Image (cartoon, rainbow, N blue to C red):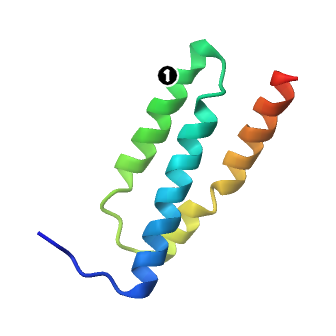
Amino acid sequence: MVVALDLQDFLLRARVLKLYRQALRISRRAPGDSKDELRLMIRQEMENNRVCKDKQRIRFLISGLEKLKRLDETLDMQGR
């Protein structure tokens, strides 16, 4: 079944997928013992909100990018 998306929905979906891919890339740099747990948490968060159609809520969830940026910075500091 194919669902037609308007331009705004398409762009919002693209941002969500970009965020998901970015989160998974960052999780690869996590320490070995927490890497799997972090990937599981990322996956679970995406699955929990998979059926969300409320654009305002989706934008709020995307704003979680700040958490992702902090995690990335923390992993950068640990790697040095």
Provide residue 43's location: percent of width, then percent of height: 42, 40
Provide residue 48's location: percent of width, then percent of height: 36, 49
Q: Is residue 54 above or below residue 15?
A: below
Judged from the image, the secondary structure of the residue bearing numbered disc 1 is helix
The quarter of the picture where the N terminus appears is bottom left
User: Which residue is disc 1 drawn over?
Assistant: 36
The quarter of the picture where the C terminus appears is top right
How many numbered callouts?
1
Left or right, 73 with respect to 7, comes to right
Q: Residue at x 58, y 12 (%)?
A: 33
Q: Residue at x 53, y 57 (%)?
A: 18
Q: Is residue 75 above or below residue 43?
A: above
Q: Residue at x 59, y 29 (%)?
A: 28
The front one of 80 and 36 is 80
Q: Residue at x 66, y 27 (%)?
A: 29
Left or right, 67 with respect to 58, comes to right
Q: Residues within 10 Å of mark 1 (few under 14, many from 20)?
A: some
Provide residue 20's location: percent of width, then percent of height: 50, 50
Q: Is residue 6 above or below residue 34?
A: below
Q: Quadrant of residue 9?
A: bottom left
Three-letter amino acid code at the position of disc 1:
Asp
Left or right, 68 with respect to 35, comes to right
Q: Quadrant of residue 52?
A: bottom left
The front one of 80 and 12 is 80
View extreme (left): residue: 1
